[in-house]
Amino acid sequence: MLDCSHGLVCLLGYTRDRVNRKNLIVVWNPLIGKSVEIPDRADIVIGFGVCPKTSDAKIVKISRFVEATAEVFTLSSGAWRSVPMNKPLKSKS
């Protein structure tokens, strides 16, 4: 379990198929017994929450393979969007 917010639970795991193994992200509403599988690639998911203004569930992840890339999945749109990230400055020690 990644997190829960506003009655929704975000679950992380992997498919059982060892040959074509992939990440599995599911947003589940235990009150009504409904769940939605979120399409994903091999990235690191780091956060889950519900926007208080729109009541829309969101998942945040950072890519392991592309430098300084973050994405946000919005449940209502059913799509990932890229979010700009600032790179840390290199120190001149």
Image: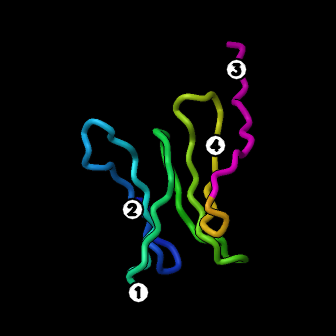
Residue indicated by mark 2: 11
Instruction: Answer with left or right where residue 74 lies relative to residue 38.
Output: right
Please name the residue shown 64% across and 43% down the image: 70
Please name the residue shown 49% across and 42% down the image: 41
Q: Secondary structure at mark 1?
A: loop
Quarter of the image containing the C terminus?
top right
Of mark 3 and mark 2, the one earlier in the sequence is 2
Residue 74 rendering spot, x and y as whole percentages: 63, 62
Q: How would you rate the neighbour count of disc 3 (Cα within 10 Å): few for under 14, some for 14-19, many for 20 or more?
A: few
Residue indicated by mark 1: 31
Please name the residue shown 38% across and 55% down the image: 12
**Three-letter amino acid code at the position of disc 1:** Leu
Q: How would you rate the neighbour count of disc 1 (Cα within 10 Å): few for under 14, some for 14-19, many for 20 or more?
A: few
Label 3 to label 2, Cα distance in Å?
Answer: 36 Å
Label 1 to label 2, Cα distance in Å?
Answer: 15 Å
**Three-letter amino acid code at the position of disc 4:** Ala
Q: Residue 70 shows which numbered tag?
A: 4
Instruction: Answer with left or right where residue 8 lies relative to residue 1.
Output: right
Residue indicated by mark 3: 90
Quarter of the image containing the N terminus?
bottom left
Label 3 to label 4, Cα distance in Å?
Answer: 20 Å
Instruction: Answer with left or right where residue 83 lies relative to residue 65.
Output: right
- Inspect the magenta stretch and tell me whether residue 87 lies in it: yes
**Three-letter amino acid code at the position of disc 3:** Lys
Q: Which residues are magenta?
A: 79-93
Please name the residue shown 43% across and 56% down the image: 25
Mark 2–mark 4 contact, CB under 8 Å? no
Q: Compared to 8, does 32 lie above or below?
A: below
